[in-house]
Amino acid sequence: MRSFEWVTRAEPHRERRRRIVREHPEIRALFGYDRRTIAVTLAVVLAQFAVAWSLGAFAARWWVVTLAAATFGAVLSHWCAMAIHEAAHDLAARRARSNKLLALIANLPMVLPAAMSFRRYHLAHHALLGVAGEDTDLPRSIEVRLIGAGRVRKLLWLFFYVVAYLGRAARFAKLPSRDEWINLAIQLPAAWLSWRLLGAPGFAYLLLSTLIGHSLHPVAGHFVHEHYVYAPGQETYSYYGPLNHVTFNVGYHVEHHDFMNVPGWRLPALHRIAKRHYDTLVSHRSWTWVLWHFITDPALGPHARIVRSRAVHEGAVRRSIRGGASDEGGTNAAGAAGFEASATGT
């Protein structure tokens, strides 16, 4: 049976971050937030609802609804999800509550409540990258066993990726937080209003846009490109293609893990400054190719991830603390709290 690649080394981002900050202290100017995310997110949300209203108002046929959802609807829905990602790192506004509000707004056309749960659990992926049983992005062992390397099974796995992701999240589920209850209290009436005001075609368009935009659609290729091992020994990958323009540059994923408090808008500038650190890494130019390669290559599958034990991770954290080196730029306030909690086991 195929299995994860176990290593006894630390994740690479912390050390590379320190090297880059030492060599390029001017990178600190990129830290912070970027309000352009707010304007773009509001425009995307309005555009998605406008399309849904048009489909409902003209009683569009189901094939038209499906086609619309599979093309620009999936892009807009996924763009909303990437706004939630930016807000989870507090990269859209100065205050955490402003970022939460933006995430709640971005969640509205996605139908399914996700914003606050994503915010609650996502930072553990950064703090515990590759830690078996604790990295919220790692596939479960049942996924590895059932999917394996078969092309059809991998195709179906990606097609129903939302289901797989929810099942994965259940492993870490805790009692809903106050923010999650608020998210649910807003999203349920919003979904009901969408059904009433937009009609069945409009509502179906919103729901299909979310499901398709997070499955086999090219914009969802980053789910596969980010950490599945396409080159021996490399744990994280970046994508430098055109779809970055509709995902807040989430493709710059190595850069994002290196500097979580650099907004997506500024990640290309970060790459240019620290070019020699990034150009030596394997990267992708097409998310469509990434998906095709993942499905057709027998070496790839849910198992193709680099993992480490909690002991290895904590040992690396202790050595880092003893070394006293600066970790500036690696976390925002919430991320720092999450990382310290992971290091102390709380």
Image (cartoon, rainbow, N blue to C red):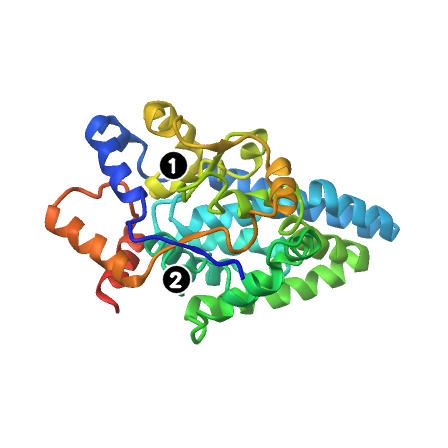
Name the residue that disc number 1 marks.
255
Locate residue 283, reporting x and y percent. 48, 32
> Outermost residue toward the front?
1
Locate residue 144, reporting x and y percent. 54, 61
Locate residue 294, reporting x and y percent. 60, 45
Residue 61 or 341: which is nearer the viewer? 341
Question: Left or right of 156: which side holds 114?
Answer: left
**Which SS class for mark 1?**
helix
The amino acid beneath tag 2 is Ala
Locate residue 124, reporting x and y percent. 37, 58
Q: Residue at x 77, y 44 (%)?
A: 68
The residue carrying pointer 1 sits among few (fewer than 14), some (14 to 19) or many (20 or more) residues within 10 Å by Cα, namely many
Tell me the number on the disc at residue 132: 2
The residue carrying pointer 2 sits among few (fewer than 14), some (14 to 19) or many (20 or more) residues within 10 Å by Cα, namely some
Indicate whether 326 appears above or below 308.
above
Residue 29 or 145: which is nearer the viewer? 145
Task: State which quadrant residue 245 falls in.
Answer: top right
Q: Please identify, in this view, whether the residue under mark 2 or under mark 1 is nearer the observer.
A: 2
> Outermost residue toward the bottom?
175
Q: How many marks?
A: 2
Of label 2 and label 1, which has the lower sequence position? 2
**Which SS class for mark 2?**
loop
The image quadrant where one finds the C terminus is bottom left
The amino acid beneath tag 1 is Glu
Residue 113 can be seen, yes or no: no
Question: Left or right of 33: which side holds 59?
Answer: right
Indicate whether 239 appears above or below 52.
above
Residue 279 can be seen, yes or no: yes
Q: Label 2 vs label 1: CA separation?
A: 23 Å
